[in-house]
Image (spheres, grey):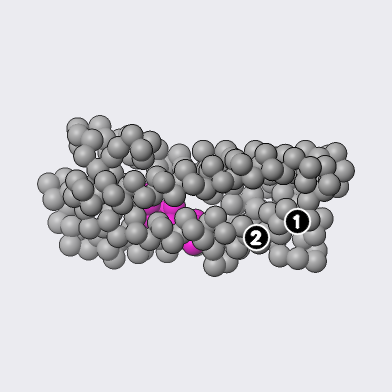
Amino acid sequence: MRLWFLGLHDRTYYACKDHPYHSPPADQPKKWKAFIQRARNCYRHPYDQYHSTMDALDFTKAPATFREVQWVSNIFLLGMAGGWLLCYGATIRTALRDRVCWFPLVPLSCNLAWEGVFVFLYPPPRFPIVTAWFSVNLLVVYVTLRFGPSPSGNSPLRRSHHLVIFILWVALWAVGHAAFATLVHPLAAFYYGGLVCLFMTSATALCQLLDRGYTQGASYTIL
């Protein structure tokens, strides 16, 4: 839902008829280069030559047609931001209560790296949502590292060195997210990288539920 709301917000912005990049260029290269070129063209912003690469999320520079309906987009943004903060808070509370955490370590490291890249390397202007997610997610990391690994299901190497392994995963994912942002465009990497985190979290959480066979550490509030 986080990326869906962000995508709806951005598509409303770029759907405005007076946006200079409303129509994609006619000449497109073939095969995989076409995807990269389309991503760059879709997320270009008229102020990129003067401002940072994430200024497309500075909605004070949006066209007048967008600002007229910006209040609708703000409702979605607040709902999206609050929903994920509620999910993180429920994860922390449930983990402390059940002494078990549902969050798998691999997608958690990917998600933390994605948030870190867009907090420290490509921070969106006037867009503190990612910083709030990153701050609360550090507490999720704490409870996951404390209660996440299962004593009976993991190898001795992971039980004794899971903190080091997690840090290495975060570093590798951060390099990947930063490289993808350089390859296409930070705004495109913001959306597509977030989608990867979302799909990975959902898939691995389902597999973990089937493997464990119990629902401790999870709740309907988290869902």
| Residue 32: quadrant of the picture | top right
Question: Do labels 1 and 2 touch, CB within 8 Å?
Answer: yes
**Which residue range is magenta in the image?**
106-116
| Nearer to us in this view, 81 or 12 | 81
Q: Which residue is mark 1?
A: 60
Secondary structure mostly seen in the magenta stretch: helix
Q: Residues within 10 Å of mark 1 (few under 14, many from 20)?
A: few
Residue 185 seen from this side: no
| Nearer to us in this view, 40 or 35 | 40
- Tag of residue 176: none
Dot placed on the residue nearer the N-terminal end, 1 or 2: 1
Residue at 60 percent of width and 40 percent of height: 76
- Asked whether 111 falls inside the magenta stretch, the response is yes
Residue at 30 percent of width and 60 percent of height: 142
Question: Which residue lies most toward the left here?
Answer: 152
Q: How many marks?
A: 2
Could you tell me which secondary element the residue under label 1 belongs to?
A: helix
- Residue 178 percent coordinates (x, y): 55, 61
- Residue 175 percent coordinates (x, y): 50, 62
220 above or below 131? above
Which image quarter is the C terminus in?
top left
- Residue 112 percent coordinates (x, y): 43, 57
Residue 199 seen from this side: yes
Is 148 displayed left or right of 166 in the figure?
Answer: left
| Nearer to us in this view, 214 or 221 | 221
Is 27 displayed left or right of 98 in the figure?
Answer: right
